[in-house]
Amino acid sequence: MTGVTARKRGRPPRTESADTRDRILTAAREEFSERGYDKTSVRGIAKAAGVDSALVHHYFGTKEQIFEAAIEVAFAPALGAPEAVADGPLDQVGERLARFVFGVWENPTTRKPLLAIVRSAVNNDTAAAVFRRLVVSQVLRRIAGRLDLPDAELRAELAAAQLVGCAMLRYVIKVEPLASADLELIIARVAPVVQGHLTGP
């Protein structure tokens, strides 16, 4: 066609790529949060982001990979847990870790995406595997590395099980009286148990 400059096919310019990628990621987080892993589709994410589904695959690959990319951002506040373990005396690590974990859950801004992650992980094996990889590699192994004690990985997992179990009952299932109990009371009861897992005999 004369006088018309056709746009070249292929990858979009770098600035446009970053914007498109962020838009897809934002849409993915919203879709997974609202619908869960099973009911979310690549096509639905693409529609919410205003792009073609092929572009979603181009940037992220499979639905599993999109989910992993989406929850890495949502899970980011929890990645400070290993620093909470390392930052202070070892005999107070249980309280520091408990305060950190419950602090993340108490904050409405960080609670909503965490709820979406947990619900997806509970209801779908693929989502659970992605969540497990993230928790193990980014949190538990790093906590274990800071303990420098025998059976450090098992200790970190038991402490995490204690805290995640309490968080599930309080924030996800909302079992009373735990759901409405004073946070300081919960920390006072849970912290010594976490301490025992991490540094006990």
Image (spheres, rainbow, N blue to C red):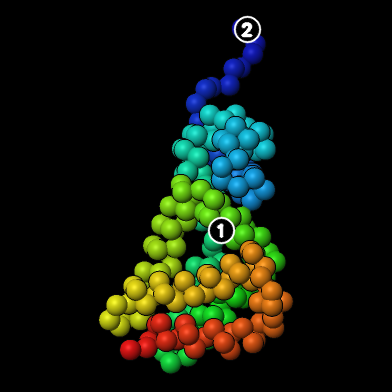
In the figure, residue 166 lies in which quadrant? Answer: bottom right
Which is in the foreground here, disc 1 or disc 2? 1
The image position of residue 121, as x and y in percent, is 52, 54
Residue at the spot 51% in from the left edge and 44% down from the top edge: 66
What secondary structure is marked by label 1? helix
Residue 30 visible here: no
The image position of residue 131, as x and y in percent, is 47, 56
**Mark 2: few, some, or many residues within 10 Å (few <14, many ≥20)?**
few
Label 1: which residue?
118
What secondary structure is marked by label 2? loop
Residue at the spot 58% in from the left edge and 67% down from the top edge: 168
Label 2: which residue?
2
- Kind of residue at disc 1: Val
Residue 107 is marked as none
Front residue of this view, candidates 65 and 115? 115
Front residue of this view, candidates 120 and 178? 178
| Residue placed furthest toward the top | 1
Front residue of this view, candidates 24 and 175? 175
Please state, as top left, top right, bottom left or bottom right, where the C terminus lies in the image.
Answer: bottom left
Residue 55 visible here: yes
N-terminal of the pair, mark 1 or mark 2, is 2
- Kind of residue at disc 2: Thr
Relative to 68, 35 lies left or right: right
Q: Is 93 placed above or below 29 here?
A: below
The image position of residue 195, as x and y in percent, is 45, 86
Residue at the spot 46% in from the left edge and 44% down from the top edge: 65
Q: Distance between the residues labelled 1 and 2?
A: 56 Å
